[in-house]
Image: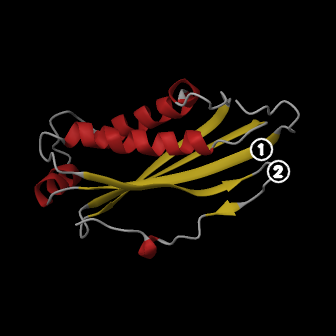
Amino acid sequence: MVNVGSKEVTTRKAIAGGEIRLSTKAMRLLSGGGVPKGDVFTVAKVAAIMAAKRTAELIPLCHPVPVSHVDIQFQLDEARRCVTVTAEASTAAQTGVEMEALTAAAVALLTIYDMMKAADKGMSISNVRLLRKEGGKSGLFVNEIGEDELPVSD
């Protein structure tokens, strides 16, 4: 692990995102709320929060960070048959929460896949990335790759 012992404790925040594309049938089922496994977005939100809190157990050289807040948002785009996940994590620590936000976004997407796989095994998870981070020595980072520049699978 990298030694962060001499770094100053600062308030830090990171936002990550990703998306999952579904078939027309699966998108209809998801937006209609008739998924046999239950409330997809509530389960995915809880899974994402749990994952953010346990990131250091999953990523071998990641520092355990006292996560003070995690928020997960979902946006349905029925025209693109896509759900976009945005995960925000914050802390006051000696290192950032980028990995926690990324892990939360990825696990939310995987949970959606798990809950929807009976309707669509061909779903595609993509574009999991850090969108923004603030705090710490390096300060503000905003991902300059716009949504229109990201590869989108059909």
Q: Along the line of sight, which residue is nearer the eye, 141 or 67?
A: 141
Query: What residue appears at the point 42 percent right and 33 percent down from the top-left corner?
Result: 46
Q: Position of residue 109 (x, y in %)?
A: 36, 45
Q: Where is residue 102 in the image (x, y as percent from the top left)?
A: 52, 45
Q: Which residue lies furthest to the front in this view?
A: 1
Quadrant in which the N terminus is drawn: top right
Q: Where is residue 19 in the image (x, y as percent from the top left)?
A: 36, 56
Q: Which residue lies furthest to the top in this view?
A: 57
Query: What residue appears at the point 29 percent right and 43 percent down from the top-left corner?
Result: 112
Query: What residue appears at the point 79 percent right and 36 percent down from the top-left corner?
Result: 94
Q: Quadrant of residue 149?
A: bottom left
Q: Along the line of sight, which residue is nearer the eye, 29 or 102?
A: 102
Quadrant in which the C terminus is drawn: bottom left
Q: Which numbered disc covers residue 11?
A: 1
Tag 2 near tag 1, CB within 8 Å: no
In primary-sequence order, the first of circles 2 and 1 is 1
Q: Position of residue 57 (x, y in %)?
A: 54, 23
For disc 2, the marked residue is 137
Is 57 left or right of 120, judged from the image as shown? right
Per the image, label 1 sits on a secondary structure element best described as: strand
Amino acid carrying label 1: it is: Thr
Q: How many labels does the image show?
A: 2
Q: Which of marks 2 and 1 is in front?
A: 2
Per the image, label 2 sits on a secondary structure element best described as: loop
Q: In the figure, 87 relative to 80: above or below?
A: above
Amino acid carrying label 2: it is: Lys
- Spatial CA distance of label 2 from label 1 is 11 Å
Q: In the figure, 19 relative to 4: above or below?
A: below
Query: What residue appears at the point 59 percent right and 64 percent down from the top-left corner?
Result: 143
Q: Residue furthest bottom?
A: 148
